[in-house]
Image (cartoon, rainbow, N blue to C red):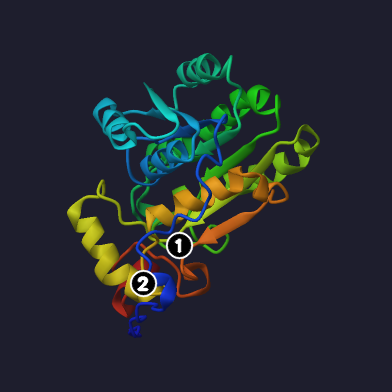
């Protein structure tokens, strides 16, 4: 089996800066953002940053204690944060929440961040497992977007769908998730066309390897020690702060001509070996012989 020389960590002035916040204070004052998956990781970071910039943020997530933690992190910043506990796969519930939260405020920014998957080779994924991942990462995204459209159209708004690096090239162990994410990318480009006349912009944002506090220790260790050095040319995971700042930028007037795009914040992971989530791959020759029998 071929071995891969680890990528060295990218260095330089950009990595010597502790704070990546570059947007002017109160840039998003008077705007309303809806963020799903708001209780941890990328979603939590996005909520905190948007509130810092003056936005009113409605967070949606399944875990009440995690959402309360986001509210604590927001504290007494310039904007405000409120949250609703819901499973985005519950169509009636999530439509009701979006309608209630946005009836008066409208929506200036919708961030579809809720998602998740497990790692398994395609022939190890059951029908139910495949459908569950597609339901969360594709069907629920459509439900949220379709309900939010009427509120986004009031002033012209921005939709950011959080995706995965390499969605257009494939990753071992993610057949179910990438099938769903590819569907979201196609929907993103289609809605960017269909709703452009309404002033609605739609983009996919694809982080690379994000190692957040919510990950189990064994998965975090595997990503940090193996996946990042082997598969990310920059040699680093993607900081959640980088993603949050870019989301805020897209929502700002400076992002008004950006639509229908897959924007990858991944340290060139989509150009490298690929983010493969099965340890024993490629399979050993004897395993190939067994599979042919």
In the image, 265: left or right of 227?
Answer: right
Contact (Cβ within 8 Å) of mark 1 with mark 2: no
Where's the C terminus, which quadrant? bottom left
Indicate the position of residue 287 as horizontal and vertical percent values. 31, 72
Question: Which image quadrant for residue 209?
Answer: bottom left
Q: Is residue 227 above or below residue 114?
A: below
Observer-nearest of 225 and 177 = 225
Residue under the image location 27 percent in, 66 percent down: 224
Indicate the position of residue 162 as horizontal and vertical percent values. 50, 46
- Per the rendering, the mark at residue 171 is 1
Label 1 and label 2: CA atoms lie apart by 31 Å
Mark 1 or 2, closer to the camera: 2
Q: Which residue is mark 2?
A: 16
Secondary structure, mark 2, is helix
Residue under the image location 55 percent in, 34 percent down: 110
Q: Is residue 179 above or below residue 44?
A: below
- Per the rendering, the mark at residue 282 is none
Residue under the image location 25 percent in, 64 percent down: 222
Where's the N terminus, which quadrant? bottom left
Question: Which image quadrant for residue 226?
Answer: bottom left
Residue under the image location 70 percent in, 28 percent down: 155
Most extreme residue toward the right is 197
Q: Residues within 10 Å of mark 2 (few under 14, many from 20)?
A: few
């Amino acid at each position: 089996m071929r071995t891969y020389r680890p990528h060295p960590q990218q260095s330089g002035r950009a990595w010597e800066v502790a704070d990546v916040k570059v947007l002017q204070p109160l840039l998003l004052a008077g705007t309303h953002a809806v963020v799903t998956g708001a209780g941890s990781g990328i979603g939590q970071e996005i909520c905190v940053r948007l509130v810092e910039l003056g936005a009113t943020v409605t967070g949606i997530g399944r875990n009440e204690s995690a959402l309360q933690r986001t509210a604590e992190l927001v504290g007494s910043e310039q904007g405000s944060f409120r949250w609703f506990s819901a499973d985005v796969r519950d169509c009636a519930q999530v439509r009701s929440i979006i309608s209630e939260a946005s009836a008066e405020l409208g929506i200036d920014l919708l961030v579809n961040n809720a998602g998740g998957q497990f790692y398994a080779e395609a022939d190890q994924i059951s029908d139910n497992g495949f459908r569950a991942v597609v339901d969360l990462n594709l069907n629920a995204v459509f439900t949220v977007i379709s309900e939010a459209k009427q509120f986004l159209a009031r002033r012209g708004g921005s939709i950011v769908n959080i995706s995965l690096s390499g969605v257009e090239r494939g990753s071992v162990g993610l057949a179910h998730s990438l099938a769903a994410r590819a569907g979201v990318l196609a929907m993103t480009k289609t809605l960017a066309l269909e709703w452009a006349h309404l002033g609605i912009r739609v983009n996919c944002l694809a982080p690379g390897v994000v190692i957040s506090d919510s990950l189990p220790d064994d998965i975090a260790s595997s990503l940090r020690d193996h996946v990042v050095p082997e598969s990310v040319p920059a040699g680093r995971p993607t900081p959640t702060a980088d993603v949050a700042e870019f989301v805020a930028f897209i929502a700002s007037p400076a992002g008004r001509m950006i639509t229908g795009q897959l924007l990858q914040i991944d340290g060139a992971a989509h150009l490298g070996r690929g983010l493969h989530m099965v340890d024993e791959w490629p399979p050993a020759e004897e395993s190939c012989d067994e599979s042919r029998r």
